[in-house]
Image (cartoon, rainbow, N blue to C red):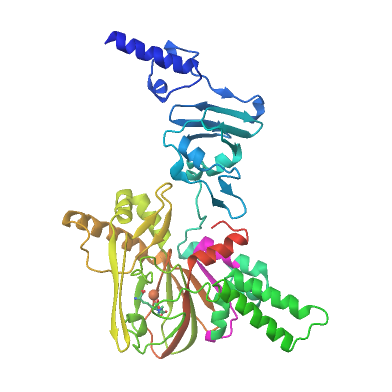
Amino acid sequence: MWYHRLSHLQSRLQDLLRGRVTHWALQQSNFKSLFPLAIHWHHTASKSLNCVWQQHEDHFELQYANNVMRFDYVWLRDHCRSASCYNSKTHQRSLDTASVDLCIQPKTIHLDETTLFFTWPDGHVTRYDLDWLVKNSYEGQKQKVIQPRILWNAEIYQQAQVPAVDFQTFLETKEGLKNFLQNFLLYGIAFVENVPPTQKHTEKVAERISLISQRWRSSIQSAKTRPGADCGSDHELLIAKFRLKLKKVGKTTRPFRETIYGRMWFFTSDFSRGDTAYTNLALDRHTDTTYFQEPCGIQVFHCLKHEGTGGRTLLVDGFYAAEQVLQKAPEEFELLSKVPLKHEYIENVGECQNHMIGVGPVLNTYPWNKELYLIRYNNYDRAVINTVPYDVVHRWYTAHRTLTRELRRPENEFWVKLKPGKVLFIDNWRVLHGRESFTGYRQLCGCYLTRDDVLNTARLLGLQA
Ligand SMILES: C[N+](C)(C)CCCC[C@H](N)C(=O)O
Ligand SMILES: O=C(O)CCC(=O)C(=O)O
Ligand SMILES: [Fe+2]
């Protein structure tokens, strides 16, 4: 036994002398004192760089720029950006990850200035810039939020005095669009004002969010102002050409999310569809399309007409409420983010026959940093709960009550009367909406937008999303 242990230590020591520090070695608390010189960190030649690294048996450890990072060797091989592994024109991986030996270890590692070089057993060399590793490491990502936000209650939102953007500015200037999107990303709601109260103009506003139509618009603009340009038929031809081009790349309907309600929708209290939205009843706070596997990312509302009383819109920041739950009862937050449930839309009115089902928890968080990214909350559309055993059900109801209490606090309610000319964008993954009951004739139009396309536009304008 003794002998065995000793020889084991000896072979480890040989490993160490060959420059390989093992994971096992670090776990032995007395190891350092046994062999004080055995574990060696590689320091950089330039001390000012402040970078040390160590090659463990099953991972690479790097300390740089106040970060301690650990990298799996398969990961390091998989993310190689050499010309044969990665196509930098298409930003796509060429390497077949399945061909990488799962036990791969680098033959040698060395640092030159700020670049690390890994030489693999087959001679292939992978180079990483230290800053790239910081940016792309798990440890680096964990500390970062994907989406910076300002959580609000009615007072916070009103004090912030977030300006609405003017229709013309929004349509014609990049700054107008950028400011609007920045506010939308931070608060989850944003307004455009002075919009002519028609469905066509509302559609125009929605289209602006897509960068494709923005490029299209500016191309037409520059063609128009080109010296000697004939603004008549030539111009028409140009527009037709652009439309065709857009159609070819499948960009014509972006960024609309066409649903069972259509691409653009228009509704009043005529019960033309089998849903309470099409009545004049009050609607408690909720998010829409919870019965889709992926609820619509953004909702646009424009009240075109209202001759009557009531009908104010209620807005509540679901993330602010969820944050309160996290502070007061973290285990309830956890439960709401773990228990999957169904939401359902069953319609059988005239020609409209639909049965939609969506499954997912009320709170959706990124597993690596616990950041909340989607709240699915609609008590009207919540389906029979048959996905959880009775004792969990009871705890879930308790947690749901806690969240509902937060969502219903009067100080969290922001009420607005939507007037013709004022278009409201709502982040349907974050902000809940509702409405007061009303009398008289009330017309609303709007649409759902695809979140990916809106975030795409925001990122291309330099915003973090
Ligand atoms: C917006 N628009 C009137 C088209 C549809 C309303 C959908 C209502 C549904 N109960 C939900 O919450 O998803
Ligand atoms: O009528 C309203 O103001 C909103 C109704 C509603 O919740 C919806 O259409 O999604
Ligand atoms: Fe709704």
**Residue 417 higher or lower than 15, as above or below:** below
Question: Does residue 187 belong to the magenta stretch?
Answer: yes
- Depth check: 6 or 329 in front? 6
Answer with the quadrant where ligand 1 appears in the image: bottom left
Front-most of 29 and 333?
Answer: 29
Q: Residue at x 42, y 22 (%)?
A: 26
- Quarter of the image with the N terminus is top left
Expressed as whole percent of the image width and height from the top left, the position of residue 171 reads 64, 75
Give the residue drawn at x 46%, y 31%: 59
> Above or below — where is 371 with respect to 247?
above
Q: Give residue 55's position: percent from left, percent from top.
A: 50, 27
Q: Residue at x 20, y 63 (%)?
A: 386
Q: Which residues are magenta?
A: 180-199
Q: Is residue 267 visible?
A: yes
Measured from the top left, where is residue 346 in percent x and y?
28, 77
Hey, which quadrant is residue 240 in on the image? bottom right
Between 270 and 211, which is closer to the camera in this rendering? 211
Q: Is 142 on the left-hand or right-hand side of 182?
A: left
| Residue located at (50% from left, 72% from top) | 425
Farthest residue, direction left: 390
Does residue 417 appear in the picture of this structure?
no
Q: Is residue 348 left or right of residue 110?
A: left
